[in-house]
Amino acid sequence: MAKEKGIKEIEDLPGIGPTTAEKLKGMGYDNLDKIAVLDPHSLAELSGMSVDKAKEAVEAARNATTLEFSTASQVYEERKAIGRIATGSKELDDLLGGGVEAKAITEAYGKFASGKTQLGFQLTVNVQLPVGKGGMDGKVLFIDTESTFRPERIESIAKAAGMNPEDALSNIFVVHAQNTEQQILAVEKADKTIRENNIKLIVVDSLMALFRSEFPGRGALGERQQKLNAHIHKLQGLSDKHNLAVYVTNQVMDNPAILFGDPTTPVGGNIMAHAATTRLYLRKSKEDKRIVRLVDSPSMPEGEAVMKITPNGIKD
């Protein structure tokens, strides 16, 4: 099927203007592929347009999208070229298969002071290193939802890495999100900043904090999960489009249904569980040691690593 000319975004589709496009994007239908797989009646119901207009829009979306097939060998070669960011701990890098990878969402969850934010700071510095030295030679977008960003910590880690601290700080773009709307908007508007500044890492610390406080109780769960789903998909989309890494921290709760073993469970439910490519569970050990458990990864087996949080950053 020939690709329809002039249609690149959903607002280019017949019958869908900017207002309807924003409405659909807010519900997670943010690209042509997602419109193409809808039936016209569902699109009409979601958008408020007539079924006839919806038929035109769906048909145009199907004509505008292309589906390409690759051999597993081609996919393997592409994966070899994916960038990775060193964590500062060789043991943790080995656990992750070489570091935190691009084109993926890495989630770190754990209790207070388990080292989630510290690992984020280390990645924020390390991503700026050259490709051959554990970095991706890129800059950072840091979305701070809990007022945890500390430039003085970045300064000390950068000095230890042999970097100019002022340069390291100027390569980090910080957004202080006060509510979920600002958090979502920071990601929605990030595309231009990413392109113009060679951003290779997005950090969200923490992903769920504002969602938990603004959507408490079971009554708000449906709306929360819908917004969260769209937000995470946008993060993954930016990661794929710009070949960058996404690192998010997450809060935990005690699951009373777990009678034996560790009851600590990450918040966010199934949506968070399915969205994260790699999941890390951090817990505090003796003194400055932290135990990192690889809970889920599509390419690496489960396992544990021990790292230290020092004044100079993450170490073995």
Image (cartoon, helix red, strand yellow):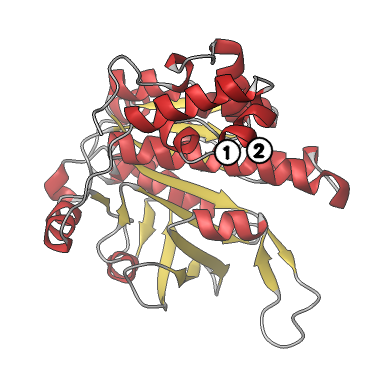
Residue at horizontal 29 percent and vertical 34 percent from the top: 242
Specify the label residue 131 is tagged with.
none
Q: Is residue 79 visible?
A: yes
Residue at horizontal 80 percent and vertical 41 percent from the top: 215
Circle 2 Cα neighbour tier, 10 Å, few/some/many (<14 / 14–19 / ≥20): some
Q: Are marks 1 and 2 in contact (CB under 8 Å)?
A: yes
Q: Dot 2 lies on which element?
A: helix
Q: Nearer the viewer, residue 32 or 25?
A: 32
Compared with residue 308, is residue 12 higher up or lower down, i.e. above or below?
above
Q: Residue furthest bottom?
A: 260
Q: Is residue 98 left or right of residue 32?
A: left
Residue at horizontal 22 percent and vertical 45 percent from the top: 68
- Which amino acid, mark 1? Ala
- Which amino acid, mark 2? Lys
Figure disc tally: 2
Which residue is identified by label 1?
A: 230
Circle 1 Cα neighbour tier, 10 Å, few/some/many (<14 / 14–19 / ≥20): some
Compared with residue 213, is residue 188 higher up or lower down, i.e. above or below?
above
Which residue is identified by label 2?
A: 227
Give x and y (percent) for residue 290.
49, 68
The Cα atoms of the two marked residues, 1 and 2, are separated by: 5 Å
Give x and y (percent) for residue 67.
28, 43
Q: Dot 1 lies on which element?
A: helix
Give x and y (percent) for residue 165.
32, 31
